[in-house]
Image: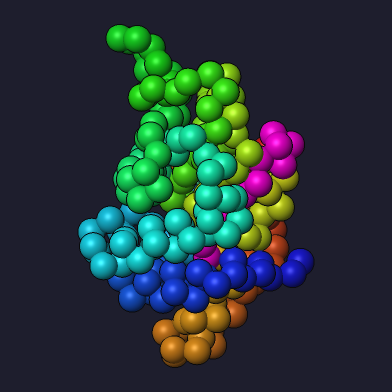
């Protein structure tokens, strides 16, 4: 399978930030278990960006530019963050775009109002769903479904990092009429890491062997055969 393509103009900057703050983890001998149950030699911790004010400001600036470039100036009514890692980014981006903010729980709260969506979401509102990262896209699909269930409109989802190597991520959202936008992919991280000497040839080969066939890599390393 082919390697992911770059996310575009924001890709190298976001990749540089992730590498600089050491949010890119490589552990081929002790694979990570992902949300989807797959095994992976790599893990990107976008949550770490929140602790770096200059980096997070830049990320939000790039996100706002992407919204203007790929979605529009007056095409959104709200920004909804996915629990947990998407919430701070939705807060900063909604503030930057001067839009209402919401957050979406992974599942409805089992008590109190029992709500899955927190905040005010008018019927028909055009909502951008924001997450820190998409791997296979199952988490985003859950958040999108919840927002649609509440009778709002979702045509766009935005992540800081998109693996770009699981076709399910874009496909599962496309089935829901949603376009997935990312600020960086593994291609951007690989390009910046190799140009700056942060990944030696052995490490690069190990990441590439996963990215070229992540399902086979996962199966060979004890990961689940995931449905999404
Ligand atoms: O595209 P997917 O295959 O669904 O995987 C990506 C999801 O995994 C991570 O969340 P996690 O489940 O770790 O929860 P958190 O945000 O609460 O940390 C990440 O924040 C995404 O939501
Ligand atoms: O798929 C995941 O669970 C996942 C992958 C990754 O690189 N980073 C993360 O926070 N979650």
Q: Position of residue 22 (x, y in %)?
A: 33, 70
Asked whether 81 or 39 is in front, the reply is: 81
Asked whether 108 or 123 is in front, the reply is: 123
Residue 57 image-quadrant placement: bottom left
Q: Is residue 21 left or right of residue 13?
A: left
Looking at the image, can residue 89 be seen? no
Q: Residue furthest top?
A: 112
Q: Position of residue 144 (x, y in %)?
A: 57, 32
Asked whether 75 or 144 is in front, the reply is: 75
Looking at the image, can residue 185 be seen? yes
From the viewer's perspective, is residue 170 above or below residue 25?
above
User: What residue is shown at x 38% (from left), y 12% (from top)?
Assistant: 114
Magenta span of residues: 174-184
Q: Quadrant of the N terminus?
A: bottom right
Q: Residue furthest right?
A: 1
From the viewer's perspective, is residue 110 above or below residue 12?
above
User: What residue is shown at x 40% (from left), y 16% (from top)?
Assistant: 115
**Residue 176 located within the stretch drawn in magenta:** yes
From the viewer's perspective, is residue 192 above or below residue 24?
below
Q: Quadrant of the C terminus?
A: top right
Residue 117 image-quadrant placement: top left
Asked whether 149 or 141 is in front, the reply is: 149
User: What residue is shown at x 63% (from left), y 39% (from top)?
Assistant: 155
Q: Position of residue 201 (x, y in %)?
A: 54, 88
Q: Position of residue 167 (x, y in %)?
A: 71, 52
**Residue 146 located within the stretch drawn in magenta:** no
């Amino acid at each position: 399978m082919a390697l992911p393509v770059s996310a575009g103009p924001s890709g190298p900057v976001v990749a540089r930030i992730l590498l600089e703050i050491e949010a890119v983890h490589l552990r081929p001998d002790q694979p990570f278990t992902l949300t989807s149950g797959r095994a992976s030699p790599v893990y990107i911790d976008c949550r770490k960006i929140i602790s770096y004010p200059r980096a997070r400001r830049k990320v939000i600036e790039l996100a706002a530019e992407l919204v203007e470039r790929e979605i529009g100036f007056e095409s959104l009514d709200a920004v909804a963050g996915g629990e947990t890692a998407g919430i701070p980014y939705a807060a900063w981006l909604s503030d930057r775009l001067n839009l209402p903010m919401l957050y979406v729980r992974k599942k409805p709260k089992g008590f109190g109002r029992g709500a899955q969506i927190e905040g005010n979401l008018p019927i028909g509102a055009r909502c951008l769903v924001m997450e820190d990262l998409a791997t296979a896209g199952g988490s985003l699909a859950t958040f999108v479904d919840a927002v649609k269930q509440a009778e709002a409109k979702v045509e766009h989802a935005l992540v800081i990092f998109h693996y770009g190597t699981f076709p399910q991520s874009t496909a599962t959202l496309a089935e829901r009429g949603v376009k997935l936008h990312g600020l960086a992919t593994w291609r951007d991280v690989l390009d910046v890491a190799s140009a700056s000497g942060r990944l030696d040839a052995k490490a690069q080969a190990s990441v590439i062997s996963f990215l070229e066939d992540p399902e086979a890599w996962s199966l060979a390393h004890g990961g689940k055969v995931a449905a999404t």
